[in-house]
Image (cartoon, rainbow, N blue to C red):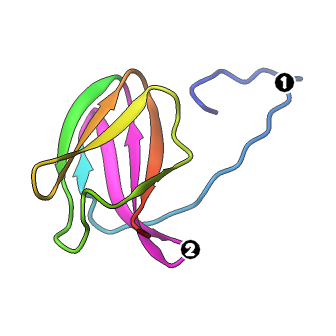
């Protein structure tokens, strides 16, 4: 859990979300990115599998300038890029959720 080995006797506090999707926005050896919904608003789920720099193109109905980051892991940064893109920069495996409620 959270890229840490768990051993017998360890105590953890875990929370998570179960999601499903048909076609991801991006899925390669570095990043998995897909659409979802959080509290009734469009959201993008981002999971980096290792340190990486990636650009993704958002669906046309989302504005790359109007989102808030929910629950980011340390080491991941997301910035607008161009008219419909986002730049994902990660120092290590991690993830975050972008809520487009703005």
Q: Residue at x 28, y 59 (%)?
A: 24
Report whether 94 appears left or right of 16.
left
* Extent of the magenta region: 28-50
Image x and y of residue 98, in percent: 42, 55
Answer few, some or many: residues within 10 Å of disc 2's Cα (few below 14, many 20 plus, some between 14 and 19).
Answer: few
Q: Residue at x 45, y 74 (%)?
A: 41
Q: Residue at x 56, y 74 (%)?
A: 39
Report whether 82 appears left or right of 35.
left
Image x and y of residue 46, in percent: 39, 47
Image x and y of residue 100, in percent: 39, 66
Q: Quadrant of the C terminus?
A: bottom left
The residue sitting at the bottom extreme is 40
Rounded to the nearest whole Å, what is the CA distance between mark 1 and mark 2?
Answer: 33 Å
The residue wearing badge 1 is 10
Q: Main secondary structure of the magenta part?
A: strand
In the rendered image, the vertical position of residue 10 relative to residue 31, given as above or below: above
The residue wearing badge 2 is 39
Q: Are marks 1 and 2 in contact (CB under 8 Å)?
A: no
Q: Is residue 36 magenta?
A: yes
Which of 94 and 76 lies nearest the eye of the viewer? 76
Chain-order first, disc 1 or disc 2: 1
Label 1's element? Answer: loop
């Amino acid at each position: 859990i959270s890229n840490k080995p768990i051993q017998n006797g360890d105590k953890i506090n875990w929370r998570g979300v179960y999601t499903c999707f048909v076609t991801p926005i991006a899925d390669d050896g570095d990043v998995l990115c897909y659409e979802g919904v959080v509290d009734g608003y469009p959201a993008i789920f981002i999971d980096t599998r290792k340190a990486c720099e990636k650009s993704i193109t958002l669906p046309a109905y989302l504005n790359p300038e109007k989102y808030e980051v929910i629950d980011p892991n340390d080491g991941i940064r997301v910035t607008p890029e161009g008219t419909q893109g986002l730049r994902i920069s990660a120092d290590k495996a991690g993830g975050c959720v972008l809520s487009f409620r703005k």
